[in-house]
């Protein structure tokens, strides 16, 4: 009887040991084959299961969890967006404005040539002298012709920039510098001719 009781107790203890062996942590080599039922129900895609298994086998559970959440959660929208400041583009030149600018440029350079020629006439007659100290070094030679073209070139550039300006006021008065300079050259030229005679 004692022998039978010892045999039963030995059988029960071996069963308890067998039950305890099932609750031992899984072998890392067999972790890919054994997935607990809870994890099987929680995982929704095979890519996440493989990421979880590979991370468990490597011992990096936190890294796999962050990778899986990064794969599921989309990137948040930024609270603000950087945008370029609006740029004021120069308006397109109309044909009439382009023709007017070319005509005023020709008139201005022609009147400057007239002023240079009349200055040479007044100086060669002996009745006049050059009052402009900037032109005086060139007045007694043919260099007066290109010297008097410097101001018209600068005013041509200024008028063109005003014509293409983004400010409406500048686009309305773009013709004034060339027109005033042309009138001034014509006035100086007629005065030089009166002095020459």
Image: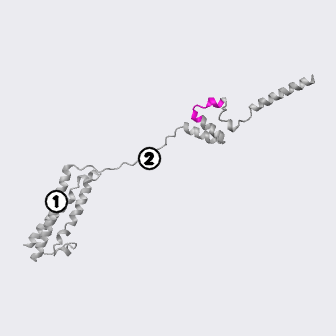
Q: Assign a secondary structure to mark 2.
A: loop
Q: Is residue 64 visible?
A: yes
Give the residues drawn in magenta, as a range. Answer: 38-48
Identify whether 159 is placed above or below 40: below
Along the viewing direction, whichever of 60 and 168 lies nearer the viewer: 60
Q: Residue furthest top?
A: 1
Per the image, the residue denoted by label 1 is 106
Q: Is residue 166 toward the left or the right of residue 38 in the image?
A: left
In the rendered image, the quadrant that contains the N terminus is: top right
Measuring from the top left, give residue 73's x and y in whole percent: 54, 37
In the rendered image, the quadrant that contains the C terminus is: bottom left
The secondary structure making up most of the magenta span is helix
Measuring from the top left, give residue 150's x and y in whole percent: 22, 66
Q: Residue at x 71, y 37 (%)?
A: 27
Q: Residue at x 83, y 29 (%)?
A: 13
Q: Quadrant of residue 4?
A: top right
Q: Is residue 192 magenta?
A: no
Measuring from the top left, give residue 38's x and y in whole percent: 66, 30
Q: Residue furthest left?
A: 197
Per the image, the residue denoted by label 2 is 82
Q: Residue furthest bottom?
A: 126
Q: Residue at x 89, y 24 (%)?
A: 5
């Amino acid at each position: 009887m004692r022998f039978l009781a010892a045999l039963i107790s030995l059988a029960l203890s071996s069963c308890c040991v067998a039950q305890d062996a099932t609750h031992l942590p899984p072998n890392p080599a067999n972790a890919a084959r054994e997935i607990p039922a809870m994890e099987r129900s929680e995982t929704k895609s095979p890519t996440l299961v493989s990421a979880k298994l590979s991370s468990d086998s490597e011992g990096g559970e936190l890294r796999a969890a962050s990778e899986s959440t990064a794969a599921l959660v989309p990137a948040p929208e930024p609270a603000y967006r950087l945008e370029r400041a609006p740029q004021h583009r120069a308006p397109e030149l109309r044909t009439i404005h382009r023709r007017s600018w070319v005509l005023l440029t020709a008139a201005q350079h022609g009147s400057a040539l007239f002023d240079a020629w009349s200055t040479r006439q007044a100086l060669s007659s002996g009745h006049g002298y050059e009052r402009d100290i900037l032109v005086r070094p060139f007045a007694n030679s043919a260099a007066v012709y290109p010297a008097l073209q410097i101001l018209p070139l600068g005013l041509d550039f200024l008028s063109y920039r005003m014509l293409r300006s983004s400010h409406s006021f500048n686009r309305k008065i773009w013709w004034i510098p060339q027109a005033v300079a042309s009138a001034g050259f014509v006035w100086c030229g007629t005065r030089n001719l009166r002095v020459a005679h």
